[in-house]
């Protein structure tokens, strides 16, 4: 049984959502779909929260109206059948927001609640179109992530509780999956012991997918995004960067932690024990080979990739792969591990520096 996650750019509008539906329909064995908020919505909700903190209710209100209108338009484009359930959800979110508007001391728990609106809206729309698509062929259920992604109460960066997640997800999914039902749920959000909404950290939907996959012992996780896989360097900057066919959990984790934006750094941890493989692929090119991440790979690469993180007036460049120890690099080394070395490069234009380093060590 496969767990698939679609990122924000994959559900950015009605036509992008339809591409996701195509992927769902052509993936045999797919049992659970995890959805991110639509593109940029979480950022907009962050702004809404800031407006509230600053006491600017007018700004907060107009930000909320814009978010609603954008999604209403999406619902209209997707089909009439979306509008009733969409309005029901909006009524309940409006009610919650009104309550938050009256709170004197806002804190991170209110922020998490507000941020969760993005995934709540996108997942509802996605479940509705899947339902319409499958009709009586297959049952499609929407399960709130708050009912099984149990976490501690560190709002904003909540720590999941794998045992509780397993317990709750077995109860919620097992029977339906056995009967061939399809489930839709939200990435990024969970709930604590008091059933308050928590979030796993910005960009954390990948993590939701692997936490659930481990809990229900899925056979694979598919992460669908707007790039064809993981590259030896950011393909938006380095046009000659190579797509990596396969990576180990360690290699992918180092790349993600050192700045490759394609995966949330904690994503692979839940998969290790069971050795569940994860594939990163592009929604608009579902038959492409993507990048597979597993316990071990067939043809290990000595030099895997380079990532960059911006720091005040310089860049931290991390070279990944066990071969990095054979390289002679005359820069101040600031960190190293089994399969990486990080360097500080001061001054100059960031993209140009990354280009230079890539050319020197990877081509
Ligand atoms: N919507 C959340 C964010 O933008 C989580 C995610 O997309 O992974 O941070
Ligand atoms: Mg992401």
Image: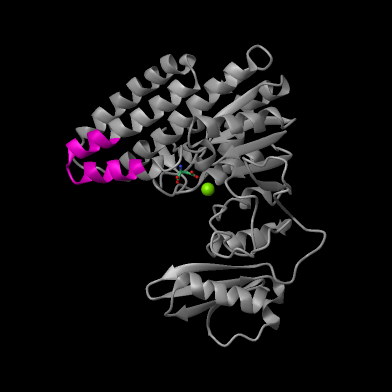
Q: Position of residue 290 (x, y in %)?
A: 70, 49
Above or below residue 63? Residue 321 is below
Residue 3 as seen in the image, left or right of residue 118: right
| Region of the chain picked out in magenta, as a range | 44-63
Above or below residue 329? Residue 162 is above
Q: Position of residue 7 (x, y in %)?
A: 54, 42
Residue 164 as seen in the image, left or right of residue 13: right
Above or below residue 344? Residue 245 is above
- Quadrant containing the C terminus in the rendered view: bottom right
Residue drawn at x 49%, y 25% as measured from the top left: 125
Residue closer to the observer: 86 or 325: 86
Q: Quadrant of residue 65?
A: top left
Residue 341 in sight here: no
Residue drawn at x 69%, y 47% as measured from the top left: 278
Q: Is residue 46 inside the magenta stretch? A: yes
Q: Position of residue 131 (x, y in %)?
A: 58, 18
* Residue farthest top in this picture: 136
């Amino acid at each position: 049984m496969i767990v698939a996650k679609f990122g924000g750019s994959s559900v950015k509008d009605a036509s992008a959502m339809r591409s996701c539906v195509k992927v769902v329909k052509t993936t045999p064995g797919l049992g659970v779909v995890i959805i991110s908020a639509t593109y940029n919505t979480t950022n907009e909700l962050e702004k809404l929260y800031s407006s509230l903190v600053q006491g600017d209710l007018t700004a907060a209100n107009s930000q909320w109206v814009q978010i609603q209108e954008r999604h209403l338009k999406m619902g209209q484009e997707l089909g009439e059948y979306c509008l009733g359930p969409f309005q029901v959800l909006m009524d309940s979110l409006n009610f919650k927001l009104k309550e938050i508007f009256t709170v004197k001391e806002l804190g991170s728990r209110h922020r998490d609640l507000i941020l969760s609106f993005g995934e709540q809206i996108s997942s509802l729309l996605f479940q509705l179109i899947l339902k319409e698509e499958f009709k009586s062929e297959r049952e499609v259920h929407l399960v709130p992530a708050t009912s099984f992604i149990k976490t501690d109460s560190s709002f904003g960066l909540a720590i999941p509780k794998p045992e509780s997640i397993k317990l709750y997800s077995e109860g919620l999914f097992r029977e339906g999956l056995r009967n061939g039902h399809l489930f839709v749920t939200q990435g990024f959000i969970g709930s604590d012991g008091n059933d308050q909404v928590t979030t796993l950290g910005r960009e954390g939907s990948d993590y939701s997918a692997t936490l659930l996959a481990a809990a229900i012992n899925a056979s694979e996780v598919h992460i669908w995004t707007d790039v064809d896989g993981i590259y030896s360097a950011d393909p938006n900057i380095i046009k000659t960067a190579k797509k990596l066919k396969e990576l180990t959990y360690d290699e992918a984790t180092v790349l993600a932690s050192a700045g490759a934006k394609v995966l949330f750094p904690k994503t692979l941890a839940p998969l290790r024990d069971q050795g569940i493989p994860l594939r990163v692929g592009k929604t608009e090119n579902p038959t492409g080979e993507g990048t597979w991440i597993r316990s071990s790979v067939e043809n290990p690469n000595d030099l895997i990739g380079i990532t960059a993180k911006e720091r005040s007036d310089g860049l931290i460049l991390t070279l990944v792969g066990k071969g990095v120890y054979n390289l002679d690099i005359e820069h101040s080394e600031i960190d190293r591990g089994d399969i990486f070395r990080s360097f500080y490069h001061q001054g100059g234009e960031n993209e140009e520096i990354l280009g230079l380093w890539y050319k020197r060590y990877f081509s």
